[in-house]
Image (cartoon, rainbow, N blue to C red):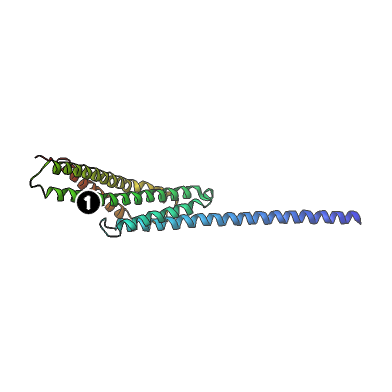
């Protein structure tokens, strides 16, 4: 009888262990499913939200009163999306995780460069106005007037050079953004991305601004102050 009882206990222990193992496997599988779902949801949501931020930024006039504040907010929000995405378990879907991260990093760089361009544009306009105002009072030019004119010209050159550099960098990011979009589509065909027409129109506006900035910079450089 004792032998039968011992055998029965052994069977119960084995059955219990097997049941526990099955439960552990099932819970592990469910956990994996949840983590995969969390990653896909985070990637999908962050890509869509980032695209919305990019679209709004491309519709924003650089001389709008709140342009700088809105662009800074967009860049900050994309940074938050990126941080949340990086907290997900990337190994659950490595291609999707990497494509989504690339898209957010790319978008954040675009927003930061657009922000820099708007800020630099304001500085360039201000320095050109200061130079123009000084030039409008050119009667009786003296040494002091010329010295101030040279200083204002140098500042205008520097500010306009900075503006052209920032607008050029933004234009280049817009140009290569299509490559990033292709990588996202390969990993997540249903991703909500910028329409090609919107992206290309933004690029053309940036290139035109870059061209105008170059012409303005050259005009400033050719100014000569003679007594």
Which is more toward the observer, 85 or 11?
A: 85
Query: Closer to the camera, 60 or 4?
Result: 60
Left/right placement of residue 1 relative to residue 151 reads right
Quadrant for the N terminus, please.
Answer: bottom right
Work out whether residue 61 or residue 120 is closer to the camera in this orientation and state it: 120
Which residue carries the number 1 mark? Answer: 126
Image point (42%, 49%), residue name? 186
- In this rendering, does residue 119 appear at all? yes
Mark 1 burial class by Cα count in 10 Å: few <14, some 14-19, many 20+: some
Pick the front one: 223 or 13: 223
Image coords of residue 213 (percent x, y): 21, 46
Q: Quadrant of residue 221?
A: top left
Q: Position of residue 227 (x, y in %)?
A: 9, 40
Provide the secondary structure element on which disc 1 rests. helix
User: Which residue is outermost to the bottom?
Assistant: 65
Q: Position of 147 compared to 10: left or right?
A: left
- Taking the spot 48% from the left edge, 56% from the top edge, the residue there is 42
């Amino acid at each position: 009888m004792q032998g039968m009882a011992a055998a029965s206990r052994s069977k119960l222990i084995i059955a219990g262990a097997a049941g526990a193992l099955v439960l552990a496997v099932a819970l592990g599988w469910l956990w994996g499913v949840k983590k995969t779902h969390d990653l896909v949801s985070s990637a999908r949501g962050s890509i869509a939200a980032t695209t919305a931020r990019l679209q709004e930024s491309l519709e924003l006039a650089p001389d709008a009163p709140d342009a700088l504040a809105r662009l800074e907010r967009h860049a900050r929000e994309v940074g938050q999306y990126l941080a949340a995405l990086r907290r997900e378990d990337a190994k659950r879907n490595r291609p999707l995780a990497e494509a989504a991260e690339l898209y957010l990093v790319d978008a954040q760089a675009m927003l930061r460069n657009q922000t820099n361009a708007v800020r630099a544009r304001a500085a360039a306009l201000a320095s050109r106005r200061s130079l123009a105002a000084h030039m409008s009072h050119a009667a009786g030019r003296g040494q002091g007037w010329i010295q101030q004119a040279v200083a204002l010209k140098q500042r205008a050159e520097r500010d306009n050079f900075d503006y052209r550099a920032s607008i050029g960098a933004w234009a280049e990011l817009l140009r290569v953004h299509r490559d990033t979009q292709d990588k996202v589509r390969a990993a997540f065909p249903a991703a909500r991305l910028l329409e090609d027409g919107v992206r290309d129109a933004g690029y053309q506006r940036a290139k035109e601004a870059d061209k105008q900035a170059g012409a303005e910079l050259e005009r400033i450089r050719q100014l000569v102050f003679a007594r």
